[in-house]
Image (spheres, helix red, strand yellow):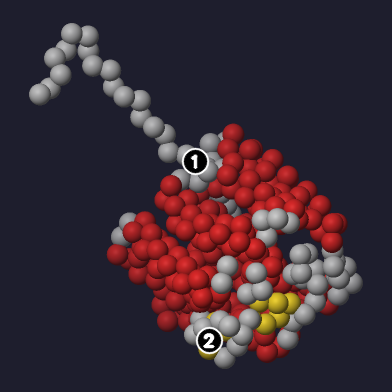
């Protein structure tokens, strides 16, 4: 897919998804809160991206991206908040009784799963490149980073109020960097480095199978994603489906990753029910 076309579709997806989220909010206060969360996540996402590029020099964006600020295409920090906010909606629907300490952990898992698919597809499409190999040319820490950021921002968005919410920007970025560095120095420096090859694909398949089994468990408990949560995700899903079929559809490892991430979501998706037509009483005269 040509990059200008991808950028144009991203703009459409961002605007459409924002409108759908806005419409789903029940009150003016909740709409204001949603816009505040989005703006803070977008600003923090830009700061996190720029500081990561500057500090680590482990990845970079293609030079053909338009509307850049420093090293970051502006579309990137506009897209990622929607991924995080969408994952928060999924968490609320599937885990309504989650305890405070469980909430950021659940969000970390959901965002990391979404980020894993987005990262490998975008890297395959050469929208950005990594200096170190890993799973399908994406190092493991590159997949975990957005999950760290999302979990940290989630805690801060829930606990800070008023002008104090501005602290979401520096605090979430610092927390994400701390977790990235800790993961590197005390784990990924020694393991899961280099090209993971078939072993990485098998690992993703195993995780996907476990997630699918747990999704069936949730479905058996009556937990599923309602249309209000599902519909805003469909635009982004369609965008990355188009990216997949235009760049990676002939390569089986990407199919494995797509299925591993997509099937658990499909299992917990609640399809709208069709209402059966009401039979007219025998002998009744149809209304004219």
| Residue at image point 58% right, 38% down | 219
- The quarter of the picture where the C terminus appears is top left
| Residue at image point 58% right, 83% down | 64
Local SS, label 2 = strand
Residue 217 point in image, percent of width and height: 64, 38
- The quarter of the picture where the N terminus appears is bottom right
In the image as oriented, which residue stretches furthest toward the left? Answer: 288
Q: Is residue 137 above or below residue 70?
A: above
Determine which residue is flagged by label 1.
270
Q: Is residue 68 above or below residue 252?
A: below
Residue 35 point in image, percent of width and height: 39, 71
Q: Nearer the viewer, residue 11 or 49?
A: 11
244 sits to left or right of 239: right
Local SS, label 1 = loop
Q: Earlier in the sequence, mark 1 or mark 2?
A: 2
Q: Is residue 245 visible?
A: yes
Q: CA distance from mark 1 to mark 2?
A: 39 Å
Q: Is residue 97 visible?
A: no
| Residue at image point 76% right, 65% down | 136
Q: Is residue 36 above or below residue 250?
A: below
263 sits to left or right of 180: left
Q: Is residue 191 above or below residue 20?
A: below
Q: Nearer the viewer, residue 218 or 76?
A: 76
Residue 146 point in image, percent of width and height: 64, 70
Residue 147 point in image, percent of width and height: 65, 67
Crowdedness of circle 2 by 10 Å Cα count: few (<14), some, many (20+)?
A: some
Determine which residue is flagged by label 2.
68
């Amino acid at each position: 897919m040509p990059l200008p076309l991808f950028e144009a579709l991203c703009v459409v997806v961002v605007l459409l998804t924002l409108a759908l989220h806005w419409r789903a909010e029940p009150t003016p206060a909740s709409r204001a809160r949603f816009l505040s969360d989005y703006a803070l996540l977008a600003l923090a996402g830009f700061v996190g991206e720029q500081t990561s590029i500057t500090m680590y020099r482990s990845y970079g964006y293609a030079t053909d991206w338009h509307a850049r600020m420093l090293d970051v295409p502006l579309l990137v920090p506009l897209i990622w908040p929607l991924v995080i906010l969408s994952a928060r909606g999924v968490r609320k629907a599937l885990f309504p009784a989650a305890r405070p300490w469980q909430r950021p952990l659940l969000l970390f898992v959901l965002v990391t799963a979404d980020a894993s698919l987005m990262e490998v597809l975008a890297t395959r499409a050469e929208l950005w490149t990594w200096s170190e190999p890993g799973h399908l040319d994406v190092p493991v820490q590159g997949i975990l980073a957005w999950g760290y950021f999302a979990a940290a921002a989630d805690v801060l968005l829930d606990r800070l109020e008023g002008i104090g919410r501005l602290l979401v920007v520096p605090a979430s970025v610092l927390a994400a960097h701390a977790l990235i560095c800790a993961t590197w120095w005390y784990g990924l420096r020694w393991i899961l480095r280099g090209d993971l090859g078939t072993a990485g694909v098998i690992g993703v398949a195993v995780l996907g199978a476990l997630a699918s089994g747990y999704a069936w468990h949730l479905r058996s408990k009556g937990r599923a994603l309602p249309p209000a949560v599902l519909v805003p995700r469909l635009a982004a899903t369609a965008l990355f489906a188009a990216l997949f079929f235009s760049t990676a559809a002939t390569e089986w490892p990407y199919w494995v990753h797509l299925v591993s991430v997509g099937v658990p979501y499909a299992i917990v998706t609640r399809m709208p029910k069709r209402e059966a037509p009401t039979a007219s009483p025998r002998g009744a005269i149809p209304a004219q």
